[in-house]
């Protein structure tokens, strides 16, 4: 995937552990606009690439902002970004969307847990200035740890519901009330830690269909590779053997397929391909439940097959 160089124009600590990094073209001019909910790949000073949601106002002059939480177990990604200075250069990809606003919805319910506020912030700002019907439920451990909370209180106080420092039991009660009171035609959007996402999805599923739940997950799924077997993949009339210890994308690119990759963990959606024949074994955190059921696409960096052969095409 092609990357472009940008410059850091501002650094703002939203909380003691979350920093907002403002980006611009190398000449200091705005990079441009993007569809709300989009994310980009960011290659930091240590050459580690991670995915971050764009969390500025999507159609504003200062649109390209990413918020990075310092992780204690960081492998160099978040820690290095917290050491940046204004004027430093980074490399970023073009924006990609896994959680865009559904045109068919008459009301939008945004649910964020912790750092999961990042895509929801841009979506809320976008919908607020256009008078699109929405509500934002923001779960955080404390006011001090709730990034963007002061700005959200200023810009859309009537739409914001901040749930700060509440117990897991209370979280469930709030979510169940939310589901009961959701207007007809609503769609739900969620982003947050894995356990939070699992709980929210389970509760939402009591009312919403798979097509009405939209989510973004930047954490790789835990994969048991002990039962991997080899299989065949056909692309453009050529057949390739995929060994048990290698991914589809590795083998195809080794043979000149030229498929873009980024995370190689099944969380960014860069390597998705169309499935013409065969049944994928989905191991990603990108596709929605309905997309998995359709078996028309797959993330070939991690997913494999339930049958001896897959026939793929470029997506």
Image (spheres, rainbow, N blue to C red):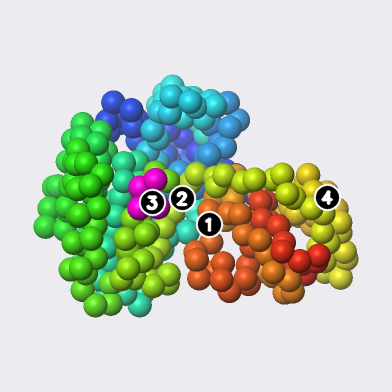
Q: Is residue 256 above or below residue 308?
A: above
For this rendering, which residue is in front, 208 or 286? 208
Q: CA distance from mark 1 to mark 2?
A: 7 Å
Q: Which residue occupies the foreground of this view, 292 or 259?
A: 292
- The CA span between labels 2 and 4 is 28 Å
Quick one: SS at disc 2? loop
Q: Main secondary structure of the magenta part?
A: helix
Q: Which residue is mark 3?
A: 197
Q: Is residue 269 left or right of residue 15?
A: right
Front-most of residues 248 and 202: 202
The region drawn magenta spans 195-199
Residue 263 seen in the figure: yes
Q: Nearer the viewer, mark 2 or mark 4?
A: 4
Residues under numbered marks 2 and 3 in contact, where contact means CB atoms less than 8 Å apart:
yes
**Distance in Å between CA atoms under marks 1 and 3:** 13 Å
Give the image location of residue 275, x and y in percent: 69, 70
* 4 and 3 marks in contact (CB < 8 Å): no
Q: Which residue, given by chain and number where applicable, does mark 1 sit on? A: 286
At 32% from the left edge and 63% from the top edge, which residue is drawn?
Answer: 204
């Amino acid at each position: 995937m092609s990357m472009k160089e940008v410059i850091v124009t501002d650094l703002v600590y939203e909380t003691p552990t979350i920093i907002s990094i403002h980006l611009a073209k190398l000449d200091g001019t705005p990079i441009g606009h993007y569809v709300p909910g989009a994310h980009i790949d960011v290659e930091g000073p240590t050459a580690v690439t991670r995915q971050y949601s764009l969390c500025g106002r999507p159609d504003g002059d200062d649109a390209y902002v990413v918020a990075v939480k310092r992780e204690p177990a960081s492998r160099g990604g978040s820690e290095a970004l917290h050491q940046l200075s204004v004027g430093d250069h980074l490399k970023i990809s073009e924006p990609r969307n896994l959680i865009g606003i559904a045109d068919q919805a008459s009301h939008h319910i945004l649910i964020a847990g912790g750092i999961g506020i990042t895509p929801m912030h841009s979506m809320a700002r976008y919908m607020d200035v256009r008078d699109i019907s929405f509500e934002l439920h923001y779960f955080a451990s404390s006011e001090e740890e709730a990034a963007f909370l002061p700005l959200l209180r200023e810009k859309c106080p009537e739409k914001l519901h901040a749930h700060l420092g509440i117990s897991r039991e209370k979280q469930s009660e709030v979510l169940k009330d939310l589901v009961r009171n959701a207007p007809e035609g609503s769609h739900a959007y969620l982003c947050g830690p894995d356990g939070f996402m699992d709980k929210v999805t389970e509760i939402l599923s009591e009312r919403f269909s798979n097509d009405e739940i939209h989510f973004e997950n930047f954490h790789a799924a835990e994969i048991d590779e002990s039962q991997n077997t080899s299989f065949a993949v056909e692309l453009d009339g050529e057949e390739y053997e995929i060994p048990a210890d290698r991914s589809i994308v590795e083998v195809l690119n080794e043979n000149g397929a030229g498929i873009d990759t980024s995370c190689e963990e099944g969380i960014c959606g860069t390597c998705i391909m169309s499935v013409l024949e065969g049944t994928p074994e989905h191991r990603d955190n990108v596709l929605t439940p309905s997309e998995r059921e359709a078996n028309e696409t797959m993330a070939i960096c991690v997913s494999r097959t339930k049958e001896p052969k897959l026939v793929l095409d470029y997506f």
